[in-house]
Amino acid sequence: MGRGVSMRLAFFSDVHGNELALDAVIADLRQVGCDGIYVLGDLAFRGYAPKACVEKVAEVADKVIRGNADEWVVRGVRPGEVPDERRAGMDEEAAFARGLLAREELEYLANLPLLLQEESPFGRWLAFHATPLDPFPVVAADAPDDDIESRIVAGQDARLYLYGHIHVPYVRDIRGRTVVNLGSVGMPFDGVPQASYVILHVDGDAFRVEHRRVPYDVEAACRRYDEIGYPAAEMMKRVLRTARPV
């Protein structure tokens, strides 16, 4: 790509099996018009439609990476990964999703890479689920600059770093590097019950990050948890309605 190139790239993550939210985001990014679509993990876990979400992401995305919750769906929740008192319930949720996926879809999730990196006219960008080498650690939106630098930048040389996992959208400049969290498509945690994703506007050697919020029918999504007999339906309806973690 030459320096005069103008393009729009879409990044989204943390769908968490919420098909109505995913459909809304796909419709929005198609209306915007994108030259590339990148998905940063957590496709199926905790959702009422894990299979449809895996299928739709695989169909629409140019590249997809693996999140921690994709690992949980494939192999269960291991001791030490979540608080002991929550592990049994979360493992039941992972098993629920696993039971609705075909073997090919489980293999697809298991074989997704952990890191994306590309050269662009403005320099290199890196995209990952939580940190470049590990899809589990939590790096909060208000983490100190030194924390962001050691755990998100993590010695990787790039101009732009994009991640998901925390479900809270933000953009920060850390000593000349731009760090972006996409928020979550299916389960935002910032108090706004709308799907969140990012459009990266590239214009030659400059770029601009646009966070987009897309409304979807939250109550219809809540009804689908009941219809499918989800094991933690009441909790998930509360999470969707309040856009806050449990």
Image (cartoon, rainbow, N blue to C red):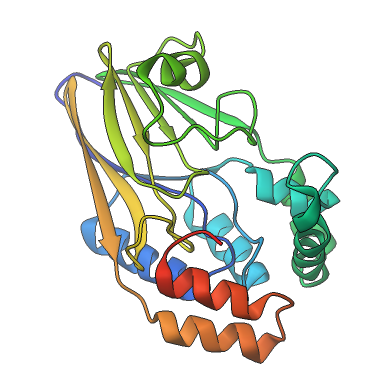
How far across and how far down the image is residue 58, in percent? 58, 56
The answer to whether any part of residue 178 appears in the image is: yes
The C terminus: image quadrant: bottom right
Residue drawn 43% across the image and 59% down it: 188
Residue drawn 62% across the image and 69% down it: 47
**On screen, residue 10 above or below 99:** above
The answer to whether any part of residue 106 appears in the image is: no
* Residue furthest front in the image: 85
Does 17 sit left or right of 197 as displayed? right
Does 27 sit left or right of 46 as displayed? left
How far across and how far down the image is residue 37, in percent? 41, 47
How far across and how far down the image is residue 48, in percent? 63, 76
**On screen, residue 123 above or below 73:** above
Residue drawn 36% across the image and 18% down it: 145
Does 5 sit left or right of 227 as displayed? left
Tell which of 80 and 17 is nearer to you: 80
Tell which of 246 and 127 is nearer to you: 246
Residue drawn 27% across the image and 60% down it: 213
**On screen, residue 33 above or below 166:** below
How far across and how far down the image is residue 162, in percent? 41, 33
Does 246 sit left or right of 218 as displayed? right
The N terminus: image quadrant: top left
